[in-house]
Amino acid sequence: MSASAAIRRDLPAYPNCIPLFDLPGCPHRHLLVKLEGLAPLASEDKAALLRLPMTSGKLPADADLHREGDRPSACCLLLDGFACRYRLLATGLRQILSFHVPGDIVDLQSLYLPVMDHGIATLAPSQVAFLPHQALHEMIRQHPRLGAALWRDMLIDAAIFREWLVGLGQRSAYERIAHLFCELAFKLKMVGLGDDPIFALPVTQGELADALGISTVHVNRVLQQLRAEGLIRFGNGSLTVLDWQALIAAGEFDPAYLHRPV
Amino acid sequence: MSASAAIRRDLPAYPNCIPLFDLPGCPHRHLLVKLEGLAPLASEDKAALLRLPMTSGKLPADADLHREGDRPSACCLLLDGFACRYRLLATGLRQILSFHVPGDIVDLQSLYLPVMDHGIATLAPSQVAFLPHQALHEMIRQHPRLGAALWRDMLIDAAIFREWLVGLGQRSAYERIAHLFCELAFKLKMVGLGDDPIFALPVTQGELADALGISTVHVNRVLQQLRAEGLIRFGNGSLTVLDWQALIAAGEFDPAYLHRPV
DNA sequence: CGAAGGCTTGATAGACCTCAAACACAGTGG
DNA sequence: CCACTGTGTTTGAGGTCTATCAAGCCTTCG
């Protein structure tokens, strides 16, 4: 009670907003877990984070959070569900640029690059919180440790883009799929989601195809191979890793690029 | 004289360093031009930038500035020449992740991610300046506008990675090459290098292949097509754009992702 | 002048794509 | 309850972009 009262202190500037802290069910815990893994945070930092004003909402699958060209005034924190960033080409082709799990602030970059150069969409029914840019800027200014954690997060995002470049440029379809599964399982593990060998992964084969630069048909055939070899189970929105060692070998996966203590 | 004296003021902490300002021939101008295009800078910001302590050196082509796994204590500013970031796979394959032109701070991310997840190498004889992390951190703390400019620069880097992802995932070899040539010509134009249709581009066909995820042989054949169609001249370390409009169309190039006023 | 690196060319091969159709499954509505 | 629809998955056949291998050529440079 008193905590919440203290947190409410400086909210009036953001009408219709409530502090992150007040979300029922504590869905912001994934963000906290992640940021604490990125930089040492003092308790006042965490308090400031939870004091962030926000509005939240539930969205169905395949809903756009932003479209290319948008100029957002708030950042989207994914509280629950699954999302991706993507680009559409004139030819109608789609390239998925990244997948996002609960705890990710999907468009943090919009704090410094006002115009979106790509879209963001949910892939599953999701709950999101919108954090006003202004409030984030202020928080970063007053709490440099939080700023550092957010910067590290953005830079790790860039490191993941680089890793995907390596995959699209040099790896076979088989390796790409294995690598992506390793990466997503790791990311989910890091925020404490999934029951280790089993992970919720609400992604269709077509979406995998758009992320990996291969056709849906070919994704299907490679998945069958991975299943036949006993490396994974995949379907109905979940991934089960049956043989971690073999999957990591198949994808030449080395988590160093995630810049996390293993 | 008095300017230089003022600039020398707080250098003693960095032995063997001189201020950026003191470099003969003003090779730091590309950085200044770039940062001014990224955020409004006051004259005191520019002065602080030029006061940065650094050591500089000349390197031949194909010299490594950093290797994967390094923990740099300084950032590399490319003053002159040409460089790239790359990853090597166990199989010996190489993926080039980005190309860098004078004015780029090639490993700015190492300010927040201590371990290099990729290598950096020169592609041509180059001059570089090493800027101590500590001095950069201090500068950013004292000059938030410079910090913002550097952040924007890092985020634009990430935007370029995303654009390359689109290329590797969805575009044909022909489109990829056309797109890359557009991008590099734009980047060079932005820092005032090159004489518009003609740009120094000291890159071999093998390096293009490693950047674009196609084989050297195929790069060669596509280049011949682009030449035969009268879009470009390319060879001997330089690129000439003979038909801008056609090249932009061939690569479906839209510079929005560079986040620069056109 | 020989060696090395880069460019060019031809022939063959393979990974992956496209088209097309059938199947499975969940949700909807009569 | 059962057609009906839509989305996602699976399978087959043929085709193409691009890789690989191999060799010749050119330029640069010690």
Image: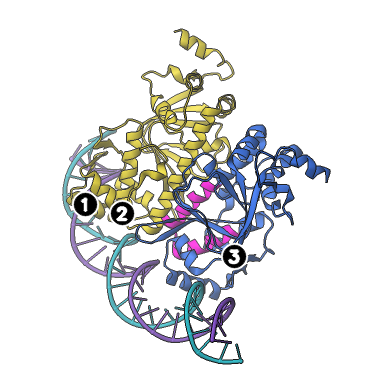
Chain colours: A blue, B yellow, C purple, D cyan
Disc nearest the viewer among 1 and 3: 3
Which residue lies under the disc numbered 3?
A201
Magenta-highlighted residues: A157-185
Query: Under tag 2, what secondary structure?
Result: helix
Number of residues whose C-alpha sits closer than 10 Å to that of mark 3, classed few (under 14), some (14–19) or many (20 or more):
many
* Residue shown at 56% from the left, 29% from the top: B133
Q: Are marks 1 and 3 in contact (CB under 8 Å)?
A: no
Cβ atoms under marks 1 and 2 closer than 8 Å: no
Which of discs 1 and 2 lies nearer the camera? The answer is 2
Label 2 to label 3: alpha-carbon separation: 33 Å
| Dot 1 amino acid type | Gln
Q: Which residue is mark 1?
A: B224
Question: Chain ID for label 3?
Answer: A
Foreground pick, B79 / B145: B145
Q: Is residue A8 above or below residue A182?
A: above
Q: Chain of mark 1?
A: B
Query: Would residue B134 be counted in the magenta stretch?
Result: no
| Front one among B181 and D20 | B181
Upstream in sequence: badge 1 or badge 2: 2
User: Whole-Å distance between the Cαs marked 1 and 3?
Assistant: 45 Å
Tag 3: residue type? Leu
Please give the residue where the numbered disc 2 appears in the rendered image.
B175
Residue A53 lies in quadrant: top right
Q: Position of residue B156 (x, y in %)?
A: 46, 41
The x, y position of residue B91, in whole percent, is: 45, 56
Q: Secondary structure at mark 1?
A: helix
